[in-house]
Image (cartoon, rainbow, N blue to C red):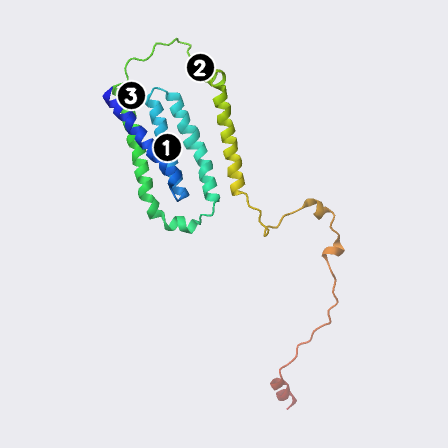
Amino acid sequence: MIFTTVLFYLLGLVLVVAAFRVVTATSPVTAVLHLILVFFTASMIWMLQGAEFLSLLLVLVYVGAVMVMFLFVVMMLDVRMEVLKGGMKTYLPMGLIIGAIMVLEMAFVLVRSWFDSGAPAAVADDYDNTLDLGVAMYTDYVLAVEIGGIVLLVGMIAAIALTLRHRTDVKVNRPSEQVRVRAQDRLRMVNIASQTETQPKGDAAENSK
């Protein structure tokens, strides 16, 4: 019990510090790395509390899918790839530290699950944890789920608005104008007089001799 309590507070401390760095980091890459750590630490806390389904869902959906969208948005910002490649040595220690913390968190949680798991809860053979979770989400907490969906929708619209740029140097093909085009509008015949090669003055004098 003491190990579980200490581990919970340790994970909570890491979660708070990483979340603080997400909103205070000046570099978008640094913020994204700390956001990955936030999701992973929250997943470990849920697994520590026995919510294995939510924990795995957080890792698969948020770390595996949503973070890809975040990275895509970050790469669409005005971040030059030359600067990122040149600063690889700058971000490498932070990435290694965050990866090491994630590995240690997983190790602590798995050790606790193996050696201090206790007796499993008595449930029926046909018990469906996912079904009960869905029923609870869309009956008891339906308002919270709808608010969460609205927040995600607003975030998606904000990301599109931030990354949308109207460029004027892009050539756009308009099929309707291409269909109505006429040959005389695109092709012009020009009568050019024939040209003859002229010799330099020095060569002309030598030929006259």
Which label is found at residue 82?
Answer: none
Q: Which residue is mark 2?
A: 132
- Upstream in the sequence, badge 2 or badge 3? 3
Position of 166 compared to 148: left or right? right
Amino acid type, residue under disc 2 in the picture: Asp
Question: Within the image, what quadrant is residue 9 found in?
Answer: top left
At mark 3, the secondary structure is helix
Which label is found at residue 38?
Answer: 1
Q: Quadrant of the C terminus?
A: bottom right
- Upstream in the sequence, badge 1 or badge 3? 1
Amino acid type, residue under disc 1 in the picture: Val
C-alpha span from label 1 to label 2: 27 Å
Badge 1 local density, few (<14 within 10 Å), some, or many (20+)?
A: many
Q: Could you tell me residue 42's position as x and y percent? A: 36, 28
C-alpha span from label 1 to label 3: 21 Å
Q: Which residue is mark 3?
A: 113
Badge 3 local density, few (<14 within 10 Å), some, or many (20+)?
A: some
At mark 1, the secondary structure is helix
Pick the front one: 20 or 59: 20
Compared with residue 76, is residue 19 higher up or lower down, i.e. above or below? Answer: above
Marks counted in the figure total 3
Q: Quadrant of the N terminus?
A: top left
Q: Farthest residue toward the left?
A: 2
Q: Could you tell me residue 11's position as x and y percent? A: 31, 29
Position of 46 compared to 165: left or right? left
Pick the front one: 197 or 136: 136
Q: Could you tell me residue 138's position as x and y percent? A: 49, 18
Residue at 47% x, 16% y is 140
Amino acid type, residue under disc 3 in the picture: Ser
- Upstream in the sequence, badge 1 or badge 2? 1
